[in-house]
Amino acid sequence: MSISSAPNAQRVPVRVLSAVVCLTAIAACLAIETPAQADFASHDSSCHHPPIPLPDPVITGMTSFDASKLETPESIAIDSHGNKFLSFALTGEIRKINSNGNQSTFAMLPIGAPPLTTCGPFIGIMGALAIDPNDNLYVTVASCVAANRGIWKVAHNSGAMSLVASLGPSALPDGIAYRDGLLYVADAEQGLIWRTRADGTEAAQIWADDPLLKPGLNHIYPGPNGVQFFNDELYVANSNQFEILAIPLRRHGAAGTVRVHATGIACDDFAFDVLGNMYCTTDPFNTLVRIAPDGTSEVLLTAADGLDGPTASVFGRGKNDRLDLYVTNGSFPFFSTTHQPSLMVVDVGIAGAPR
């Protein structure tokens, strides 16, 4: 696929029209059923339209970070004002980039040891970010201090940090998704999905435990990694098994039967567009892959386009960046050979689904 890149690239008007058409198509699917209308929100094959042709992606911007300072962005969340928050996995810093592009440290989470210190099943590391309707952040932390290993909240108005739920020394919390006051967290080592209340009023419980979630013996890459909702299914990237899984959200909140959505892709984290296409980042394989609702896939970007350990993606939320996909390049020192961490902006020609 031909990839064009220009700092001031102009959006082709047909992309807006394409997004409108896609929105019309997905609206019918979104209205098919809710938990109140069915025992559980099942995977509905009638909503799997043939892939709609989309324009080639256009790289429209890039913000670079300092690899020598271990500025390795693992995840990104965008608030209702367009501020971007990035988790620097190896240092515990949440970096804020405001709408003018100015950067500042928003919070420092307790990794519990110097960067790259081995503890528990891996190293002390901060994972993914999620955001609630009030713009509060939630982040997973695999701290070397056992009491701090778990799920943390960072208040939007102050940056104040508080432990929402502890997960214990054997857990390796990674991907996280917010839904209706609840947090769903991937355990990349134990092959579980945890769930807890975002207000911190209950201990984390195992929500899903299935053989498909396990990373496998002597695994090299994480097991359950990125997690995101689309409609009433929680999608899970099992990186080591090169699979994308989907777990229906049953009535009353229980997990349904795990199914395999796509195979052959070592996805880290991902975002959905309004039609249900997934945009998977594949650290350390240096690709951005679009997976259609029928499970077929195509590579959109590679290392030749500037990817360096892509770890996460999220769509813009404003009227001027609705079609933009923000991609973090972690460039972790144990994977990268080019050491160019960055935040890349990619116009993919279709709007993102709300998280």
Image (cartoon, rainbow, N blue to C red):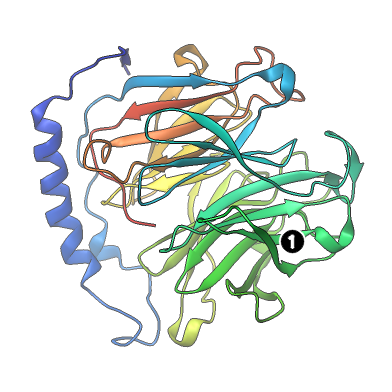
Q: In screen coordinates, is 181 left or right of 50?
A: right
Vertical placement of residue 251 versus 26, above or below:
below
Q: In screen coordinates, is 172 left or right of 82?
A: right
Q: In screen coordinates, is 154 left or right of 191?
A: left
Identified at 43% across, 36% down, the residue is: 98
Q: What residue type is labelled 1?
A: Gly
User: Which residue has dot 1 on it?
Assistant: 150
State the residue lying farthest toward the front.
158
In the rendered image, is residue 191 in sight? no
Identified at 16% across, 43% down, the residue is: 19
Q: How many labels does the image show?
A: 1
In the rendered image, is residue 286 in sight? yes
* Residue 258 % position (x, y): 54, 67
* Residue 292 % position (x, y): 34, 45
Helix, strand or loop at mark 1: strand
Q: Mark 1: few, some, or many residues within 10 Å (few <14, many ≥20)?
A: many
Return the residue nearer the eye: 104 or 325. Answer: 104
Identified at 85% across, 60% down, the residue is: 170
* Residue 305 % position (x, y): 44, 15
Quadrant containing the N terminus in the rendered view:
top left
Q: In which quarter of the image is residue 324?
A: top left
* Residue 190 % position (x, y): 77, 60
